[in-house]
Amino acid sequence: METAGGRTGGAIWLCAVVLRLALVPLPLTLSDDAQRYLWDGKVAGAGLNPYRFPPAATELTSLRDEIWQRLPHTDVPTVYPPLAMTAFSIASRAPFPLLAWKAIATAADLGACALLLALARRRGIPLGRTVWYAWNPLVLLEVAGAGHVDALGVAAMLGAALCLTPRNPEGRPAPRSAILAALCAAAGVLAKLAPAAALLMWGRQSGRPRRFLAVSCGLTLLAFLPVVISVRGVPPGLVTYGLSWEFNGPLYEPLWRVLDISGAAPALARGVDRLKETTRMWETWNPIYPYLYPQLLAKALLALAMLAAVLRSLRDRDPVAGTGRLFGSLLLLSATVYPWYVLWVLPWAALTRNTAWLALSALILLSYLPKIAGVPLMPWVYLAIWLPFGALLLLGKGWGKG
């Protein structure tokens, strides 16, 4: 006999399906990332290396098609991990590649909705809270509408959290659950790199950190090894992303401007000058100068803050609140905050009723104004997004426990 909770969960999930089905067939409008996914999949499917060759490479001339003509950032090799690349390759071979890819991403998103419902049941949380993710317009637009690969990572992340949540509130995850959580965590990292930041925290929460990290890190390293060997180090696309990408970072935007006004970069350059005079190693220190500019200094400071957030997360024993707090902190410290990045925080905000982050899922859509209306992001659109969010963050109850 079906329980009332089961009927509620079924209705929530069924409505989530209907809402997404309406968007899957639509063409891309707000983002063209899915075109890049399909190109990378086509390159990998042809036996060539998308981590080494950017779309503009002459080695890929024979593959150029209509998708190639609409690609963004044709001078940058791919940044997407191996599991994502596998999914791209599958979609690129379908008769209708874009529709196939959006179907894959939407299926993963619906899986995330089902896992979120299961997590709410296990924790005794009202199932209605999951609507804030399952029916959220931002999620619908970014996955069923735009086909962002983040859906795969979010689903894997929710799978890890479900496995880390014991059925008995006073217990700890069973050995088998810890292994399943590690497998989900590895899948998340191999879909998009963001979950790597949570591996240490999830390992502690599993109660069997060595086993968890051996499985999750072992599988991840094994999958990335061919990539690292093929490019002889860190994939160049990731280097370019880390050094050059920036968009709507809530702390990054004011920080680099403060560093610029304060003359931090020239002061550091003078310090390098004195270091050269002291050590008499004139050529040794010269490569540092090109990196002494405000934007990169701001990223370096925020990277240190990200490391502190990861270390702080080791004190969190609750997979829901801890994961939300960690990914929320990382997002605020990022130099690049596209609307679909909020999907990494939204499931946890839904379960814990975090008002600030739920509001951000609506406010962040304003960052599309520069694309659709030609309105500059800075300063008014930026302030319209982050000032209300900041006020709600200060006044809200925080993450607490779901």
Image (tube, helix red, strand yellow):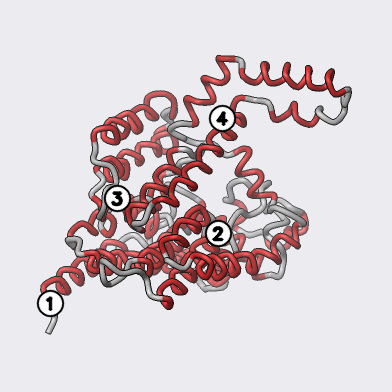
Q: What whole-number distance in Å separates the C-alpha atoms at marks 1 and 2? A: 42 Å
Q: What whole-number distance in Å separates the C-alpha atoms at marks 3 and 2? A: 28 Å
Q: Nearer the viewer, mark 3 or mark 2?
A: 3
Q: What whole-number distance in Å separates the C-alpha atoms at marks 3 and 4? A: 28 Å
Residue 106 shows in this picture: no
Q: Is residue 21 above or below residue 274?
A: below
Q: Identify the residue under disc 4.
A: 298
Q: Amino acid at mark 3?
A: Ala
Q: Amino acid at mark 4?
A: Ala
Which quadrant would the N terminus be assigned to in this image? bottom left
Bin the neighbour count of mark 3 within 10 Å (Cα to Cα): few under 14, some 14-19, many 20 and up: many
Decide which of tag 1 and tag 2 comes sooner along the chain.
Answer: 1
Q: Residue at x 59, y 70 (%)?
A: 219
Left or right? Give the position of 281 relative to 94. Answer: right
Q: Amino acid at mark 2?
A: Tyr
Which quadrant would the C terminus be assigned to in this image? bottom left
Q: Quadrant of residue 379?
A: top left
Q: What whole-number distance in Å separates the C-alpha atoms at marks 1 and 4? A: 53 Å
Q: Position of residue 297 (x, y in %)?
A: 61, 29
Decide which of tag 3 and tag 1 comes sooner along the chain.
Answer: 1
Decide which of tag 3 and tag 4 comes sooner along the chain.
Answer: 4
Q: Position of residue 102 (x, y in %)?
A: 43, 64
Q: What whole-number distance in Å separates the C-alpha atoms at marks 2 and 4? A: 30 Å
SS at mark 3 in the image: helix
Decide which of tag 2 and tag 4 comes sooner along the chain.
Answer: 2
Q: Pointer 3 and pointer 1: residues touching (CB < 8 Å)?
A: no
Q: Identify the residue under disc 2.
A: 37
Q: Pointer 2 and pointer 4: residues touching (CB < 8 Å)?
A: no
Decide which of tag 1 and tag 4 comes sooner along the chain.
Answer: 1
Residue 253 shows in this picture: yes
Q: Pointer 3 and pointer 4: residues touching (CB < 8 Å)?
A: no
